[in-house]
Amino acid sequence: MTPWLLALLARTVLTLPPLSQRLTFSLLSVTLLVSFGSSMPYGYNLAVVNSPAEHIKAFYNATWSQRYGHGLGPAPLTLLYALTVSIFALGGLGGSLLVGLLVERYGRNGALSRSALLVLLAGGFMGFSRELGSPEMVIIGRSITGIHSGICLSVVPLYLGEIAPKNLRGFLGLMPSIFICLGVFSAQVLGLPELLGKDRFWPLFLSVVVVPASLQLLLLHCFPESPRYLLIERNDICGATKALQRFLGSPEVQDVIEEMQEEQRSLSCVEMASVWQLLRERSLRWQTLSVAVLNAGMQLSGIDAIWFYTNTIFENAGIPVSQIPYTTMGTGAIEVVAGLIGCFTIERVGRRPLIITGFCAMGVCSAGITISLLLQAALPWMRYVSVACVVGIIAGFCMGPAGVPFLMTAELFTQSHRPAAYIVGGSLNWLCNFTVGFIFPFLQMSAGAFCYLVFCGVCLLVALYVYLVIPETKNKTFMEISHIFATRRSVLSVPAQLIGMMKLDGYGTLESSSLEGSGSSLP
C-alpha cells in the first residue's frame, strides 16, 4: 500500500467522530434491542406481501369461490389485495395517533414493551388464516401489525433521541433505519422459492415477525426508562440519575441532571402540548411544517411503491420471472449497505446533506425508470437501466430519508411539544403510505411509465425545501435547535455562528445564562 494512501486512511480514522468515548454497552445494547424488536418488524411487514402476492390472491379467490360459488374478477381481486397491502398503513395511522397517550402514561420504554404484544396477536391471526379459511384474518393481522409499527416508528426514535448524548444522537438515531432495511432484506430472502416462498408456507411467512417482538418483550424491561422523561415529566430525580448512570456508564452525571433541570424549569409553566396546540403555536410553525414536509415526502417519494410492488415493477421492466426473486434480494442487500453508510457518516457530514442527496438521487432515478420503460421496446437492454434506477431509489432512501426525518422530529422540538410533533409527523407518514400502497397499482395501470414522474417531482421539491428552510442540527442540543428556529434568519439557513451559538458539551440543554447571552447577541 502506498504511503500516501496510508496517510489518507490514517487522517480519515483520526478525524472520525469520537463515538467510542461515550458509546457505552447499555446504550448500544438498548439501541440494538429496540431496533431489532420494533424497527425490523416494520421493514419486514413493508416487503413481506411482495413475493407471496400470487399465493395470497389464489387463496382469496378460492375462499370466495367456496363461499359464493364463483371466483373474483381481476378488478375486485386487485382491489382486495390492494386493501391487504395498504391496511397496514391505516393501522399505522391509528398507532401513530396513540403515541402521545402511550408515552405520557407508560413512558418510552413502557410503550415499546406493551406494543410488542400486538405483534403476537397479529401473528396468530395471519398464521392461522388459511387453516380457518378466512381472508379477513389476514387483513386484520396486517392492520394490527400496522398499529404496532405506527407506535414504534415514533416511539423508537423518541426514546433513542432522549437517551443518546448529542454527539451520538445521529449515529444511534439512524440505527433503526438499518434494521428497517434488514427487515426488508429478511422478507426478500425468506420469500425465495427455496425457503418460505412456496404456496403452503405463506401464512408462516407473514407471521415470522413474532420472533423479534418476543425477544424485545422479554429483554426490554432490563433497561431503564428515558432519563428526560423521568425527570422532566415525572420529576423523578433519583430514577433519572440511576438511568443516566446506566446509559452513560459513569456515576458522575450531576452536570447532566442540572442541564435537564434547567429545561424543566424553562417548561414549568408549559403543559404537554396537544396536537391542536402545536398546530396553533406560531413560534413553532416552521418546525411543524418541516416535520410535515419530511414525513409526507419520504412516503410520497415512491419508496413504498418499490417495496410493496417490487416484483410487479421488475416484471413490467422485462426481467424474467425466474430471476425476479433474486434480483429483488439483491436490491435488499444494497439497501442494507446504504443504511450502514448513512449511519456511519451522519455525524461526519450532517443531517441536511444526507437528506438532500437522498431525495435528489431518488428523483433522478424515478425519472430514469420512466425513460427506461418508454425506450424498452426499442432497446431491450434498458430493462437493466430500470433495475439500476430501482437500486438507486432504494440506496438514496436508505442513506438519509429513511431515518433522518424521525431523528429530526426529536431534535426540532423541546420536551413539551415532542410527542405532539411525532403524532403529526407519524399521521402524515402513514396517510401517505396508505395512499401510495392503495393507489399505485391503479396509477400504474392508467399512467404506465409516466407514474414515476409524480415521485420525481415530489423528491426534488422536498430536497429544495430542506435546502432553503431546515438548518443543520448536528451536535446541537434541543434548546439550541429551538433557538435557531426562533429567529427568522435561521429559517433561511443562517450559519449557527452568526446567531451567537455557544459550545456546550452536555447531554441536554442550554443553561439559562448561556441562553440569555445568546439572545443578546442576536442581530
Image (spheres, rainbow, N blue to C red):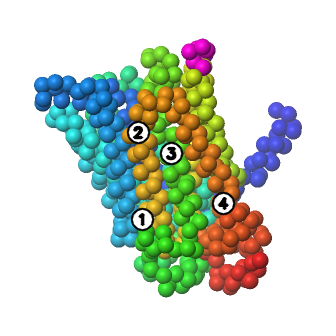
- Structural crowding at the residue carrying mark 2, measured as other residues with C-alpha within 10 Å and reported as few (<14), some (14–19) or many (≥20): some
If you read the primary sequence from the N terminus, does the residue marked by circle 2 or circle 3 appear first? 3
- Residue 27, position in %: x, y? 53, 59
Q: Which mark is residue 108?
A: 1
Tell me the mark number nearer the camera, choosing from 1 and 3.
3
Read off the residue under disc 3: 300
Residue appearing at x 62%, y 30% in the figure: 368
Residue appearing at x 49%, y 85% in the figure: 269
Q: Say what secondary structure mark 3 lies in.
A: helix
Q: Which mark is residue 345?
A: none
- 511 left or right of 274 in image: right
Q: Are marks 1 and 2 in contact (CB under 8 Å)?
A: no
Read off the residue under disc 4: 469
Q: Gap between marks 4 and 2, in whole Å?
A: 30 Å
Q: Gap between marks 4 and 3, in whole Å?
A: 20 Å
Q: Which residues are magenta?
A: 375-381
